[in-house]
Image (tube, rainbow, N blue to C red):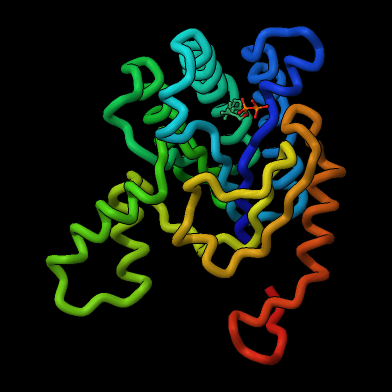
Amino acid sequence: MHVAIIMDGNGRWASRRGLPRSAGHVEGAKTVCAVVAAAARAGIETLTLHAFSAANWARPPAEIDALMHLFRRFFVAETPRCVERSIRIDVIGRRDRLGKGLLSAIERSELLSAAGSRMHLRIVLDYSSRDSIVQAAARADRIATLAPEDFYRLLDEVNHCALSAAPVDLLIRTGGEKRLSDFMLWEVAYAELHFTDCLWPDFDEQRLQIALDDYANRQRRFGALTARTG
Ligand code: FPP
């Protein structure tokens, strides 16, 4: 099963407490660690977490710096834990605009965790689904006949995704908004959508289970008439 999460609401979580937005991101990073562990316990095979979109570069430089610092810290601190739990880490998105320190932390994480087979953790950084599709389409232009699976492969290539993932089965968005925000538009074609008002720093194992229970009660038909189990 492939679960993807748009982690929204860090800023509001902080503002409601009179704290700077970066404090919400710090708390959000703690939630990431807890949810990764919970997802592995729940038997999720692939977990894709949307951490930074290409559009997020428009945020104030101080907030971007705080986020980049958090990402780097996450890869350094969490890699040994992921290796211990057999979780493979991959980073999806553009790499040419990331700082050198973050980039080497990412490459180290990917290398050290590559043998992980219990769960595939995909952290999405500097990512735009529409840009990826446009780039993959440009590459596809050179191929005479193209199946959807081939297009997946091209998308993986443009997003530096070393290990292909199955299409998303369940997309969760926290923070109350009900939109996709240019996230995995191709990969969520038949995903079930679960929106929750819970702000990301408040998301936890119990709320993940609520989303999984919601998914288990959906009838997935993939356009046909009889339900197929997801
Ligand atoms: C959206 O909330 C969240 C982000 C742009 C950043 C996501 C980052 C984290 C969850 C923390 C670190 C992640 C990792 C992988 C270590 P927002 O700031 O837009 O919240 P708002 O809608 O309330 O303003």
Above or below, comparing residue 203 to residue 221 in the picture:
above
Q: Image quarter for residue 73?
A: top right
Residue at image position (48%, 53%) is 184
Residue 168 or residue 181, whichever sits in front? 181
Point out the image quarter for the C terminus.
bottom right
Give the side of residue 71 with respect to residue 192, left or right: left
Residue at image position (59%, 43%) is 86
For ligand 1, the image quadrant comes to top right
Above or below, comparing residue 44 to residue 37 in the picture:
below
- x and y percentages locating residue 93 in the rendered image: 38, 40
Residue at image position (69%, 18%) is 24
* Total numbered circles: 0
Give the side of residue 167 with respect to residue 28, left or right: left
- x and y percentages locating residue 183 in the rendered image: 50, 48
- x and y percentages locating residue 191 in the rendered image: 61, 64
Residue at image position (37%, 50%) is 130
Above or below, comparing residue 140 to residue 27 in the picture:
below
Above or below, comparing residue 16 to residue 139 in the picture:
above
Residue 12 or residue 141, whichever sits in front? 12
- x and y percentages locating residue 115 in the rendered image: 48, 46
Residue 52 or residue 61, whichever sits in front? 61
Point out the image quarter for the N terminus.
bottom right
Give the side of residue 69 with respect to residue 229, left or right: left
